[in-house]
Image (spheres, helix red, strand yellow):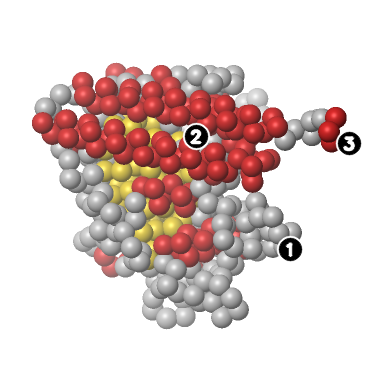
Amino acid sequence: MACTTILVGKAASNDGSTLIARNDDGQFDEKKLVVVRPKDQPKKYKSKISHLEIELPDNPLSYTASPSVDPKNGIWAAMGINSANVAMTATETITSNARVMGADPLVRYEKKKTRSGKDKIGGLGEEDFVTIVLPYIKTAKEGVKRLGALLEKYGTYESNGIAFSDNNEIWWLETIGGHHWIAARVRDEEYVIMPNQFGLDRFDLSDALGKQKEYMCSKDLKEFVEKNHLNLNQSDDFNPRLIFGSRDDSDHVYNTPRAWFMGRYFNPNTYSWDGENADFKPESDDIPWSMIPERKITVEDVKYILSSYYQGTPYNPYQKADLPTKGVYRPIGVNRTGVMAVLQIRNDVPKEIAALEWICFGANPFNTVLPVYTNTDRIPDYLSKVSLDVSTSNFYWTSRLIGALADPWFGNTIQLIERYQHAVANESRCIVNEYDVAFKKKKDKKLIDKANKELADMAEKESTKALTKVLAEASRHMKCGYNRADN
């Protein structure tokens, strides 16, 4: 599952919120937004992919999730926020190397080869993580501890990065081989960029194995590294990216260019990003995992960067100039995205309305993001009632249709898309501001459902309007068009 993640510490955001966000780039997966109530959470969980069965704790919290509409391959909850205002996004598929995988192989399901044999049960993966972790944690750090313990016990069948946040902290965990893991607290003043590669480039092993103020890891990580001769650092530094990560040719067209564009956007003057003498180029392996942005970061910035396709560079696939570099790198805003969410935990409002999940579906360059208050028992039908058949009655399919129609006629439709995105962004901010004020005056939970319905109704109205205009423009430019005056 190829995705892109960005994390923003509370001192790096414009309003003191923590922000964690991810593009869930599947294979055009149909997605929806729902609330899983405690009574709906299973007592025993079984993975479809690995056939692993796990007993779950009692007293789960309610939480939002963006599961697949078709459950045949499992839940794939993707991301969400629980009723304790803890957010989780899982997962960012990452890379590793043969030395790590050989020392601690992935735990994959294997069907029995003989009639008398037994299936080999697999470990945990993206299908499972949110469902078995998010309902049982009350801080971001608790999320790391619970997931770390599960990884050590059951293992994983893939390499993944997982983010946790609460109103105060953000933690990032990366899996190492089948059973090992490493985690770091995102510094409040920094943002983090993650494009499908092992990311961490700093680590304090002493803290991780001691007080765990800023770092955590599996209990035997030090011995694991030493025994298997994994450390490639020339100095005494412990750079996890050099030890556990990859530097493949495929990284240089698929992964590092995305990190380059994100860093270039948020820190245009801190480093040189363009030209022969640039500090970092699209294929650089040492682009920092985290940086202090040159200005405060907003939700709108996060949406823009996760929708980007190398605008203003020679790599833009939509540019008119037929340059040899056109479209050579994998965009951040890619066509097959199922869902993207910015999970925001605020510090300037009552805790009952502190959590907002800004959500959108389909190809990000052409969609729009909508905030939803997550402390509720239900999500409006426009976001939650999604079928496998195409329909304009929900946000998912309407977004997919707009993108598919606009893409071939980018130059003719991009103005319409931008107006649509601005309209929803402006109206969303107005509605959220209005209901934030109303809730502070009267702490009535009915206001949350009322706000969400107003937001969903607005999104439906604006999305239908945008689809109508984009369809009309695309229709005008069909190849089969003909007028007698054409001759």
Q: Mark 3 points at which residue?
A: 487
Q: Is mark 2 on a helix, strand or loop?
A: strand
Q: What element carries label 3?
A: loop
Report the side of 284 relative to 35 (left or right): right
Are circles 3 and 2 on residues that touch, CB within 8 Å? no
Q: Distance between the residues labelled 3 and 2?
A: 43 Å
Q: Position of residue 229 (x, y in %)?
A: 50, 70
Report the side of 248 relative to 385 (left or right): right
Q: Quadrant of the rendered structure where residue 12 is?
A: bottom left
Looking at the rendered structure, the kind of residue marked 2 is Phe
* Count of residue discs: 3
Q: Position of residue 421 (x, y in %)?
A: 46, 40
Are circles 1 and 3 on residues that touch, CB within 8 Å? no
Looking at the rendered structure, the kind of residue marked 1 is Pro
Residue 358 shows in this picture? no
Q: Is mark 1 on a helix, strand or loop?
A: loop
| Residue 421 - label | none
Q: Quadrant of the rendered structure where residue 184 is?
A: bottom left
Q: In this view, does 134 lie above or below 451?
A: below
| Residue 361 - label | 2
Q: In the image, what residue occupies the spot 52% across and 71% down?
A: 273
13 or 128, nearer to the observer: 13
Q: In the image, what residue occupies the spot 13% across and 28% down?
A: 443
Q: In the image, what residue occupies the spot 82% across and 30% down?
A: 483
Q: In the image, what residue occupies the spot 43% across and 22% down?
A: 382
| Quarter of the figure with the N terminus | top right
Q: Mark 1 points at which residue?
A: 324
